[in-house]
């Protein structure tokens, strides 16, 4: 049987390439305190319509 993640934690599955590009984008982003988890949580809060939630700002090209 597969090991379950700790309670309250979720896994996110994607390709290695997409995950690496996301990490690079987070590092180039405008929030110097951001990490990948922080950006994903902000996106999910915005996506479900949590009051006051804002779509995370993307890095400049």
Image: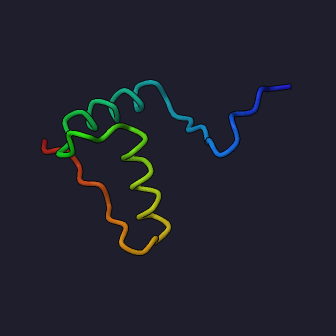
Q: In this view, does 14 lie to the left or right of 46?
A: right
Residue 6 location in percent, x, y? 69, 35
Horizontal relation, residue 47 to residue 6: left or right: left
Picture quarter with the N terminus: top right
Q: In this view, does 3 lie to the left or right of 49?
A: right
Left or right relative to 18: residue 3:
right
The quadrant in which the C terminus is found is top left
Which residue does the image show at 24% across and 54% down from the upper left? 57
Locate residue 31, reporting x and y percent: 21, 45
Which residue is at the far bottom? 51
Q: Front-most of 4 and 6?
A: 6
Q: In which quarter of the image is residue 52?
A: bottom left
> Which residue lies at the image location 34% right of the left edge and 35% below the top edge?
22
Residue 8, relative to residue 15: is it above or below? below
Q: How many marks?
A: 0
Which residue is rendered at x = 34% and y = 37% of the image? Answer: 35
Which one is in front, 9 or 12?
9
Query: Is residue 9 positioned above or below 23 on the image?
Result: below
The residue drawn where x is 40% and y is 26% is: 17
Q: Residue furthest right?
A: 1
* Residue 23 pos. (x, y %): 33, 31
């Amino acid at each position: 049987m597969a090991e379950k993640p700790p309670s309250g934690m979720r896994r996110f599955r994607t390709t290695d390439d997409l995950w690496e590009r996301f990490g690079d984008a987070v590092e180039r982003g405008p929030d110097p305190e951001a990490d990948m988890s922080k950006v994903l949580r902000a996106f999910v809060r915005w996506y479900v319509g949590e009051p006051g939630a804002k779509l995370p700002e993307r890095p400049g090209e």
